[in-house]
Amino acid sequence: MDKKAIVPIGPFHPLLEEPEFFKFTVEGETVVDASVRIGWNHRGIEKLAESKTYDQDIFLVERICGICSTSHPFAFVQAAEDISGIEVPERALYIRSIIGDLERIHSHLLWVGLAGHFIGYNTVFMWAWKCREPVLDIFEKISGNRNHYGMFKVGGVRRDIKESDIPGLIKAIDGVEEFCSMLVKAVMDDPVIGARTKGIGILKKEDAIAMGVLGPVARASGVAIDVRKDYPYAAYDKVPWERIVLKNGDVFDKTAVRLLECLESAKIIRACLKQMPKGPIDAEVREVGVGEGIGQHEAPRGECIHYVLSNTSNYPERHKIRAPSFMNVASFKKTVIGQQIADAALITAAVDPCYCCTERMAVVDPETDKVLMTGDDLVRLCQEKTEKMKGTKGLRG
Amino acid sequence: MNIVDEIKNKYGDRVEVREKSKRRVFVNAAQPDTKELVSWLFRDLAARFSIITGIDVRIGVELIYHMSFDAQGTLVSVRTQVPKPELAMPTLTDVIPGANWIEREIHEMLGVNFIGHPGLTRLLLPDDWPEGEYPYRKKTYGSEQENAEREESD
């Protein structure tokens, strides 16, 4: 007898921080089929980037994602520099690595906290986010912002790290590392977390390769890829650190990879702060040149890749963005089928999906399929409304 | 043997190889060769499928298959042109399942038909988005026929 039920999750659900719609077909408690619908967060950023200058695009791509806000500018400036081989001063390379890896720590801790919350273990959530707070303080000290740091520019970075700040920053990183080590031990030795995550949502190595998954998801399945080691850039080949590769591919290993990477990132940041040479922080860039360039950066979720085609103007002719979640989310079908429905949410969350990255406006009449309004019309409407309010509410004074 | 030599040995004059730097290699291939070339890079040379970039070049759509050789630190980008108006390209999903989503994205954004794709439905655009409206196409003025005539007279 065929008794299947469909369990819809989303698009708006308290568990998921961003809109996505999963449809799980279940037989009893077991998931037998799954599908996903995304698109609620699509903002057409690739197209928008073609109408903005290279300097403006850095700020635009920084706003693709709120959590890993520096990954996209990191990849984009490298793509622009790749077009005609712009040399970046050494001090800027170190500062880039510091920013990139600080972000990795705070992004991984954010995920560990949420994963703890998903399995109803709010102590982990409190700890991880408490540990994340000093990382944001370090960002504030360096860039003036807790998120959206605005540090990148083609040819270098926008702000220097003051020599007088460095001892304080090293002390702060030591503190973060100590707290992280405690958290790593606490999470990895905890029998409840082990029982909920070990052997669940396994992504096999061959599936990981076939689906092209990236970052911690790939490394947890034994695929040893990390752009920081494979295509050394910034200061990642100048400081000692290890790439973390595990082999089981279950939710536990995905958690472990992220936690252990936090400790490696702390090592990178400390070494960069100590070794950083004095000198200029940006090269003078007159134009990015004509041609095409590709920039890669190991974002917290995996390889972020930008392709930029440059013509003779100040705007990119084509700007292709591929965020790591685009590849990682698509692997959910391999991991979720055959699992218990109670674990499905945790498994789909284990890839650390980031929908604003995966999806990057016109008003359309559904009856006639005609485009009724363009972006300009919407702006005009918005301005008209302001004008009307001025008239009725006495805003003119 | 390095990857550039392997490609040159196997494909010879049928492809045009440009080594921009040690890390960036661009290969121009004819449309019929592309799928076989990319599949060969993936299966036999163990390249990682990174992504496909689609670019509207007015007379067609240019597809760039980015294949990453992580152990060597080389990104090979295989470029091909798919002519309008058919815009037909064999799908890669039977060889690389990870190409599923990006082919759906290129299909809805640029209108390329990936022949043999298991489910070429919308990925990102809303369900009520008009048919035949491709947001990532470049702006053209006038009808397609007028443009074709203008191209010819140019």
Image (tube, rainbow, N blue to C red):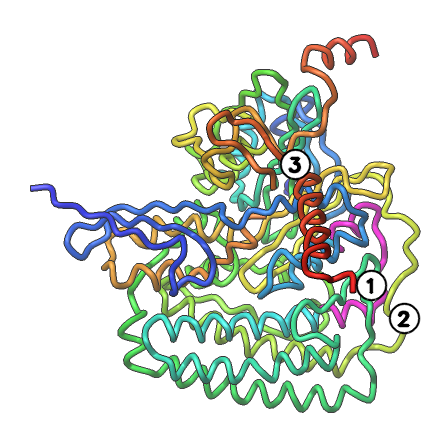
> Of tags 1 and 3, which is closer to the observer?
3
> Does A232 sit above or below residue B104?
below
Residue A91 at what x, y percent from top left?
A: 82, 72
Discs 2, 1 touching: Cβ within 8 Å = yes
**Residue at the image point whose x is 33% and y is 54% from the top:** A9
Q: Nearer the viewer, residue B38 or B128?
A: B128
Residue at mark 3 shares a chain with residue at mark 2: yes
SS for callout 3: loop
Residue B117 at what x, y percent from top left?
A: 43, 29
Category of crowding for the residue at label 1, using alpha-carbon neighbours closer than 10 angstroms: few (below 14), some (14–19), many (at least 20):
many
Q: Would residue A346 be counted in the magenta stretch?
A: no
Residue A280 marker: 2
Q: Earlier in the sequence, mark 1 or mark 3?
A: 1
Residue A272 at what x, y percent from top left?
A: 72, 77
**Amino acid under label 1?**
Gly
Q: Is the magenta stretch mostly helix, strand or loop?
A: helix
Residue A374 marker: 3
**Residue at the image point whose x is 70% and y is 59% from the top:** A74
Q: Nearer the viewer, residue B105 or B43?
A: B105
- Which region is colored magenta? A77-96
SS for callout 2: loop
Q: Earlier in the sequence, mark 3 or mark 2?
A: 2
The chain holding disc 1 is: A
Task: Identify the residue under disc 1.
Answer: A156
